Image (cartoon, rainbow, N blue to C red):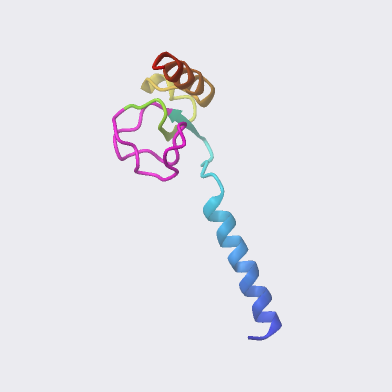
Amino acid sequence: MTSKKLIVSAALAVTIAASVTAPVQAAGKEKCYGVAMAGQNDCGNLAGTHSCAGQSAVDNDFGEWKLVAKGTCTDLGGLLKSAAKKKYAKEKKDSK
């Protein structure tokens, strides 16, 4: 492989890796916690027990999130990240 092809291949690999690991946040959308149905979450949860979409085990878990239209989260009965983190921390503390 020529050095030019090697450089192009490396640059492509870095670009693909960055796009795969970058958070997916579509314009006009926000993360809404507590509205995802089981198996319908968009990515990792607050507990850190998984980092993949479709891994939620129960409906409306406040540790799981889904992208929704900006400004609609509370209308759907969900919480934004800061409020969800507080609720998750409180429930975790109360369960001890």
Residue plotted at (70% across, 80% down)? 4
Q: Is residue 25 magenta?
A: no
Q: Is residue 51 magenta?
A: yes
Q: Position of residue 66 (x, y in %)?
A: 41, 35
Q: Position of residue 6 (x, y in %)?
A: 65, 78
**Quarter assignment of residue 50:** top left
**Quarter assignment of residue 10:** bottom right
- Going by the picture, which residue comes out furthest to the right? 3
Is 32 situated above or below 39? Answer: above
Q: Position of residue 72 (x, y in %)?
A: 43, 25
Is 9 situated above or below 81? Answer: below
Quadrant housing the N terminus: bottom right
- Going by the picture, which residue comes out furthest to the bottom? 1
Is 55 situated above or below 21? Answer: above
Quadrant housing the C terminus: top left
What secondary structure do most residues of the magenta stretch adopt? loop
**Quarter assignment of residue 92:** top left
Is 22 on the left-hand or right-hand side of 66?
right
Q: Position of residue 46 (x, y in %)?
A: 47, 31
Residue plotted at (40% across, 22% down)? 78
Front residue of 43/95: it is 95
Is 75 on the left-hand or right-hand side of 85?
left
Magenta residues, start to end: 33-59
Is 2 on the left-hand or right-hand side of 68?
right
Front residue of 16/57: it is 57
Residue plotted at (60% across, 61% down)? 15
- Going by the picture, which residue comes out furthest to the front? 96
